[in-house]
Image: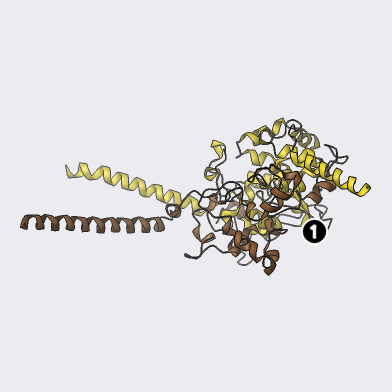
Chain colours: A brown, B yellow
Amino acid sequence: MARSFKQRLGRLLSLRTGIVLALVLLLMWVSAAFALDQKQVFLPGETSEGHHVFEASCASCHEGFKPVSNENCTRCHQAELVDDVHGTKKFRDPRWAEYRERVDVLTCTACHNEHVHMFDRGVNLQPDLCMACHEELTLTQLKSHEGFAADGCWTAGCHNYHDHRTISTGFLRQNMGAPSMLPVQEVPDRVVATSLETAPTPDLQKEFLGGGS
Amino acid sequence: MMRLVINPWLRSLVLVALCVMLVLGTSRTAKASTQEELSDITTQWQTSVHALNDINCASCHQSKETKEFLAEPNHETCQSCHEQAVDTFLLSKHGIRLLEGDAPLTPAMARLPMRQDAMQHQMNCNACHDVHSVNTVEASVDACLTCHNDNHSLNYQNSKHAELFAASNELPRPGAGAVSCATCHLPRVVAEFDDTLVHVNHNNTYNLKPQDRMVGDVCMNCHGIEYSYNSIFDPELVEANFDRPPTLELQSFDLMKAAEQRRTGNTSE
């Protein structure tokens, strides 16, 4: 009896030492990651191809443990959202409230989560996400779309969620039928004006020979 | 006996200390230029758009605030004049690390295939631009190929685009008929409120996904919409860098044609 108690105590002690040791090791590992600026060790999964080059810069997107805000995304992605057909301007309107419950269109991370599996274009939702709102209209009422796959809207390259400018039916209608090679094949020319006839005298010389910082 | 043990230790310690001093020493001061290098650079600069707009050595190599000499100006120096170019560069994969205060991007960090001899190149304005000659022809193809080593990049030389680029032969910047890497990936954009102002969008990731951004901004300067879409949505043709006309026939155009027929049919009734 006494022996088994002792044994149990021994086992408990070794268990406790084990846990303490593990915690100390964990603490050392975490502090080492911070001290050596190796924050990649905290990444919970693979970073998307758009973000992986600065994946160790946690503070670029995260403010403590708060959820990533839209403002954080638009800090870099404003240009992509200039003409957003599913934009906040439209969906803040109460008339669209019902649809907001199906897909949280006002929150970037609802579709663009990070460190999780991406289907394409940084979208973590299943590719048939459009069906949450558009199923009724397209797959049942639109004759032209009969028999189309539910996950093909954007993966086939026909529709975009945000930027419609160059893929809308209006744009296609307006531009279809043009020859393969347009009559004039030119990109905008870039002209840089000059204000002097000849170069001025260089104003630094010996500084370059001396090196410096 | 003791001396025998200590000696190798001491020796290696001294060696390590010397190495550390060497690394610290070289990183703190930039290499001094030789008179010959300086003359070469001055010659390049004298015919450049910089010189002919009175942008002198001190415009970039001297701090505006402290008047201190800057051997190696950085992207912030360029930004003081080229605001739009640097602002868009900082949003690209090339520049985002600088925006976030990290060390510059190197090809070693990339997921795309890069050249082995370029793995440690640091991505900043100077990586692509010769800032003394201000010749952007080099920045538009050769600069890309010093690092990028994937099939699409390497196949550029087989394309009609490359022929046009070689034939255009304009200096100091590619003409309107030349098609370089930069023509598609760092496209020229006409300013919204001033037709005469043409910027270069240095955010190379902007028109990559979805691809139709590139169709509208770039391809349709020269090609019809069907040709453009049928090319850019064919991954094999993209990998071959458009070395032949497209064979893909996107169903979207059939749908559109059918819709047009219905529409015009209805209106004529």
Q: Nearer the viewer, residue B246 or B113?
A: B246
Q: Nearer the viewer, residue B102 or A81?
A: A81
Classify 10 Å Cα crowding around label 1: few (below 14), some (14-19), many (20 and above): few
On the image, the x and y values in percent for residue B170 come to: 80, 40
Q: Nearer the viewer, residue A117 or B142?
A: A117
Does any portion of residue A184 appear in the rendered image? yes
Q: Give the residue at the far left of this rendering.
A: A2
Residue for point 75% across, 42% down: B252
On the image, the x and y values in percent for residue B236 come to: 66, 33
Using residue B175 as the reference point, say whether residue A99 is left or right of it: left
On the image, the x and y values in percent for residue B15 come to: 35, 45
The residue that disc 1 covers is B192
Tell me the element at label 1: loop
Residue for point 70% across, 49% down: A140
Using residue A7 as the reference point, say whether residue A170 is left or right of it: right
- The chain identifier of the residue carrying mark 1 reads B
Which amino acid type corresponds to the residue marked 1 in the rendered image? Answer: Glu
Residue for point 80% across, 59% down: B192
